[in-house]
Image (tube, rainbow, N blue to C red):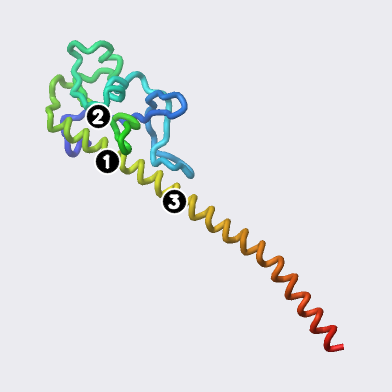
């Protein structure tokens, strides 16, 4: 983000925890996760208003109750929902210690990045589901093969026994 927006002092991604419906800080996923990002500790209220309004916002400390608590010592921030399909799954925020440094072009970039993050999360989940379906299908074929082999082996033995009896 800092390469594209030099005045950005920091950024964060927060995702909705489906169990608690709270926004949680996101961290890289480890192990076999359907998501590329996993949920870390619950976030302070950072971005909750944007998540619920589903509208990106340029936020300054002026006239914004709870703003300093939400984004610490930041003077301004741009917060955008992260969309997966038609529903928000979290928020992306870009912060600066300076006041009023972000314009509508940065808000538009944050909205674009929020949609991209949501798309990546959706695609990662779809790939994981597809892999699980393929694994289940392979197991089903193996099960059918074993079920068919039993009667086939029994029939083969009977034919062999019949052939050996016929030779005698």
Mark 3: secondary structure: helix
**Image x and y of residue 127, in percent:** 40, 49
Rendered image quadrant of residue 109: top left
Counting residues from the start of the chain, the first of labels 2 and 3 encountered is 2
Q: Between residue 111 and residue 88, name the one nearer to us.
A: 88
**Image x and y of residue 48, in percent:** 32, 21
Q: Quadrant of the C terminus?
A: bottom right
**Image x and y of residue 46, in percent:** 31, 21
Of circles 3 and 1, the one toward us is: 3
Q: Between residue 46 and residue 137, name the one nearer to us.
A: 137
* Residue pictured at 14% horizontal, 26% vertical: 102
* Residue pictured at 17% horizontal, 30% vertical: 107
Image check: 30 left or right of 77? Answer: right
Residue farthest right in this picture: 168
Mark 2: secondary structure: strand
List the residue tagged with mark 2: 80
Image check: 92 left or right of 34? Answer: left
Q: Residues within 10 Å of mark 3 (few under 14, many from 20)?
A: few
Alpha-carbon span between mark 2 and mark 1: 12 Å
Q: Between residue 99 and residue 162, name the one nearer to us.
A: 162
List the residue tagged with mark 1: 116
* Residue pictured at 19% horizontal, 11% vertical: 63
List the residue tagged with mark 3: 130
Alpha-carbon span between mark 3 and mark 1: 21 Å
Alpha-carbon span between mark 2 and mark 3: 29 Å
């Amino acid at each position: 983000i800092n390469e594209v927006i030099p005045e950005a002092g920091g950024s964060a991604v927060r995702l909705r925890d489906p169990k608690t419906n709270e926004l949680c800080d996101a961290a890289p996923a480890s192990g076999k996760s359907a998501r590329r990002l996993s949920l870390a500790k619950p976030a302070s209220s950072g971005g909750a208003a944007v998540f619920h309004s589903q509208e990106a916002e340029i936020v300054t400390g002026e006239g914004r109750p709870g703003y300093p608590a939400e984004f610490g010592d930041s003077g301004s921030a741009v917060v955008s929902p992260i969309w997966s399909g038609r529903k928000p799954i979290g928020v992306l925020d870009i912060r600066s210690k300076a006041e009023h440094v972000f314009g509508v072009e940065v808000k538009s970039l944050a909205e674009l990045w929020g949609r991209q993050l949501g798309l990546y999360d959706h695609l990662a989940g779809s790939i994981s589901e597809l892999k699980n379906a393929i694994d289940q299908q392979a197991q089903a074929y193996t099960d059918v093969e074993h079920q068919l082999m039993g009667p086939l082996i029994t029939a083969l033995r009977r034919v062999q026994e019949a052939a050996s009896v016929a030779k005698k």
